[in-house]
């Protein structure tokens, strides 16, 4: 049972208003995908292939790390008691592949063990279904620096593989992937198709802070660039080492929590929205809030 969030209807409306801020809306479009295939890439990774609505050239969509917000067909449980609640729950996913010529895109979804809006939706999804999305939002890409280190769990494997394929190569690129063996095989296959050498390490995905633990043992200089995405507390540890032990600049440290153990993304989104609302009221810019400082 998901914990409900106590808000009045007006407070909820005020929070949703934050989403209309021009800095948030920039470059975003309402579109829909039509599912053309659903395939099991690995035991716990499902690929959805789809066509993108419209007939324009999709010039803005071929980003290094494009993400979309997917509308799932159930109201957010956390807001169930509030009148006027949105009819859909939304979740963010990476477009691991996008081809403007054929107007096709792919999303790789982690099939995790929790009962959740995305897992219920995925279980019902069929070829021909329509998926409402908002996007594309460019998500984080590695900053300048050598060596370049990418750290990803299964949820960030799509982003990491896409970054390897689309960004200019940096000599000495290392990838740490906290993923099951069958997903690591996908990563190795993708790397072998690239022209330049990349060193990949598999990290056992279980236990506390798997990526941060592996990262702590990896020697790095202050010239490094670190990109990491995955479970929020694992990411917090990585960011802590980058900032406080290695002294990397914020541009060299692109670290983001994609999900959090024991907490729904609706609740994370709510906390982010509330922090942004407070920041805007205090005269700060839309993007000024440090995600790891947000009170959950
Ligand atoms: C920028 C960005 C890009 C992302 N790209 C992808 C992507 O390409 N593929 C992908 O699969 N995910 C991706 N994610 C993560 C995805 O949005 C979250 O995992 C989301 O919480 C899934 O929603 P849900 O409804 O299944 O679970 P929620 O309702 O949010 O959570 C319910 C429960 O499930 C657990 N849970 C959620 N996600 C996971 C997980 N990955 N592993 C184990 N337990 C989990 C939570 O801890 C919670 O206890 C991305 C997130 C962001 C912010």
Image (cartoon, rainbow, N blue to C red):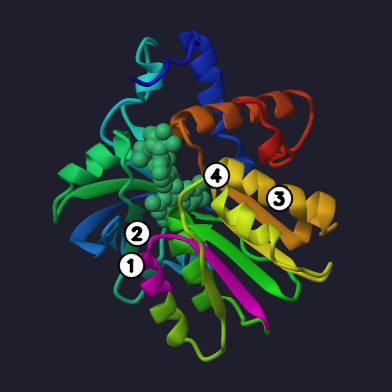
Query: Regarding mark 4 in the picture, which secondary structure is present there?
Result: loop
| Label 1 to label 3: alpha-carbon separation | 28 Å
Q: Earlier in the sequence, mark 4 or mark 3?
A: 4
The percent coordinates of residue 264 (x first, y second) are 44, 31
**Residue holding disc 3:** 239
| Label 3 to label 2: alpha-carbon separation | 25 Å
Residue for point 61% across, 81% down: 168
Q: Residue furthest bottom?
A: 195
**Residue holding disc 1:** 182
**Residue holding disc 2:** 108
Q: Is mark 2 within 8 Å of ligand 1?
A: yes
Are there few (<14), some (14-19), or many (20+) residues within 10 Å of tag 4?
few
Are there few (<14), some (14-19), or many (20+) residues within 10 Å of tag 3?
many
Q: Is mark 3 within 8 Å of ligand 1?
A: no
Q: Nearer the viewer, mark 2 or mark 4?
A: 4
The percent coordinates of residue 230 (x first, y second) are 53, 51
Q: Earlier in the sequence, mark 1 or mark 4?
A: 1
Front one among 128 and 123: 123
Query: Regarding mark 2 in the picture, which secondary structure is present there?
Result: strand
Left or right of 22? Residue 57 is left
Q: Is residue 177 magenta?
A: yes
Q: Nearer the viewer, mark 3 or mark 2?
A: 3
Q: Which residues are magenta?
A: 172-187
**Residue holding disc 4:** 208
């Amino acid at each position: 049972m998901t914990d409900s969030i106590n808000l009045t209807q007006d407070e909820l409306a005020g929070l949703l208003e934050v989403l209309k801020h021009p800095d948030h809306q920039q470059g975003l479009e309402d579109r829909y995908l039509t599912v053309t295939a659903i395939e099991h890439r690995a035991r716990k990774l499902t690929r959805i292939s789809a066509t993108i609505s419209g007939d324009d050239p999709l010039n803005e969509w071929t980003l290094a790390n494009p993400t979309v917000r997917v509308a799932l067909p159930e109201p957010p449980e956390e807001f169930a008691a509030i009148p006027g609640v949105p009819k859909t729950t939304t979740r963010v996913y990476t477009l691991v592949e996008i081809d403007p010529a054929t107007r096709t895109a792919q999303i790789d979804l982690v099939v995790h063990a929790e009962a959740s809006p995305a897992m219920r939706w995925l279980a019902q999804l069929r070829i021909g279904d329509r998926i409402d999305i908002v996007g594309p939002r460019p998500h984080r890409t590695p900053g300048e620096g050598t060596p370049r280190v990418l750290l990803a769990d299964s949820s960030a494997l799509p982003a990491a593989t896409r970054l390897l394929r689309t960004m200019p190569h940096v000599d000495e690129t290392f990838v740490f992937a906290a993923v099951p063996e069958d997903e690591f095989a996908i990563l190795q296959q993708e790397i072998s198709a690239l022209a330049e050498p990349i060193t990949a390490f598999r990290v056992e995905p279980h236990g506390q802070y798997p990526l941060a633990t592996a990262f702590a043992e990896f020697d790095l200089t202050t010239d490094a660039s670190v990109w990491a995405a995955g479970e929020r507390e694992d990411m917090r540890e990585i960011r802590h080492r980058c900032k406080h032990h290695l002294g990397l600049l914020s541009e060299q440290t692109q670290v983001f929590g994609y999900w959090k153990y024991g907490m729904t993304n609706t609740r994370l989104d709510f906390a982010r929205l509330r922090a942004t609302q407070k920041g805007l009221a205090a005269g700060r810019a839309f993007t000024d809030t440090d995600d790891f400082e947000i009170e959950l």
